[in-house]
Image (spheres, rainbow, N blue to C red):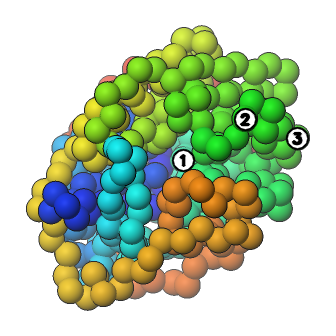
Amino acid sequence: MAAGDNVVDCYDAAGLMYPGGNCLNVAVFARRFGAGTGYIGRVGADAAGRHLVASLENEGVDIRGVGVIDGGDTAHCVIGHVDGDRVFLSSAKGVSEFEPTAGDLELIAAADAVHVGATSGLDAFIPAFGGLTRVSYDFAIFRDAEHIERIAPHTFLATFSGGSLDDVDASALADRALDAGAAYALVTRGERGALLATRGERWTTPAAPATVVDTLGAGDTFVASVLVGLLRGDDVDELLAAAARAAAETCAAAGAFGHGIPIALSARALEAGRPVVVDPERAPSVAAELAVSSASASPSPPSPSPSPRFPQPHTASAASASPTTQIKEHTP
């Protein structure tokens, strides 16, 4: 299960928009890697929202947790590219931030794990999620000590984007998360590969060769592959190598996982877009890295949003998709 952010990534030069967002991407990639998955989030009752839901259905992801907000705009991000690397130009969160309902919590409790991202605005609910199932949390580029100490104790897998970090700093960052209580700490480093650590062991993997068309979604691919492999009990060296290969494959095509259509955003949604910035207080020493959101995660629950409508789940839901993943018993 993944709960949190979604977005349509709008490639201005190509005139196309693709489904995306850390949590939505992880739900899709985990499904592709053989797990039965679902997604919990909110979209607007607009063309972008309909496309996100249709894309999830097409990928066989359970959509019972997707709420459609009448009168609201789906989150979007306008993206440029430099040598294949993504550059976030502007974004608007639309209706993507939400407070989980009782139904959402039931879906999370029934899952073997829930993935949440730092930009989803769900930090206040992480302790509750951790009492229901394993938590995978993507800190993205945010590394401040208070944030780690508040979230890591509740996590099964704590992930960081550390493309600018050398070996020593990447290892120290993993140790910080493990010391705070994470069971596993993952630091992805782009072309430098990745580090996965527990309190007693650590493993590294080089990046796999890639023909880079678009790096969007590569990190989410890696996270989803590692999470599924850990839950399945796969050999760690093998699961890391598989994750690196999968991330390289994602780089070879436009969009996080495809499904591009012509951009269809309302004038209101476009006017709501704001330049993407990195808050130096939330992401120290990473000014050169690409931001993934214009706002950092908040420790307080978001303001209540209008009551969502929930579409009917796809017939190939998590319960009926016959996943191959075998999971160990969870102890909160």
Quarter residue 197 falls in: top right
**Of the residues tagged 1 and 2, which is closer to the observer?**
2
Query: Residue placed at 39% from the left, 73% from the top?
Result: 90
Quarter residue 92 falls in: bottom left
Q: Is residue 107 visible?
A: no
In this rendering, is residue 210 above or below 39?
above
**Residues marked 1 and 2 touching at CB (< 8 Å):** no
Query: Residue placed at 74% from the left, 30% from the top?
Result: 167
Q: Is residue 87 visible?
A: yes
Marks 1 and 2 sit apart, C-alpha to C-alpha, by 27 Å
- Quadrant the C terminus occupies: top right
Q: Which mark is residue 115?
A: 1
Marks 2 and 3 sit apart, C-alpha to C-alpha, by 20 Å
Q: Secondary structure at mark 2?
A: loop
Q: Which one is in front, 172 or 303? A: 172
Q: Taking 257 as reference, is 160 left or right?
A: right
Q: Taking 69 as reference, is 168 left or right?
A: right
Q: Position of residue 111 (x, y in %)?
A: 51, 41
**Residues marked 3 and 1 touching at CB (< 8 Å):** no
Q: Which mark is residue 179?
A: 3
Neighbor class of circle 1 (other Cα within 10 Å; few <14, some 14-19, many 20+) is many
Query: Residue placed at 70% from the left, 40% from the top?
Result: 165
Q: Which one is in front, 49 or 166? A: 166
Q: Position of residue 203 (x, y in %)?
A: 70, 19
Q: Which mark is residue 313?
A: none
Q: Position of residue 234 (x, y in %)?
A: 56, 14
Marks 3 and 1 sit apart, C-alpha to C-alpha, by 21 Å
**Which amino acid does the dot numbered 2 rest on?**
Asp
Q: Taking 267 as reference, is 39 left or right?
A: right
Q: Secondary structure at mark 3?
A: helix
Disc 2 marks which residue?
Answer: 166
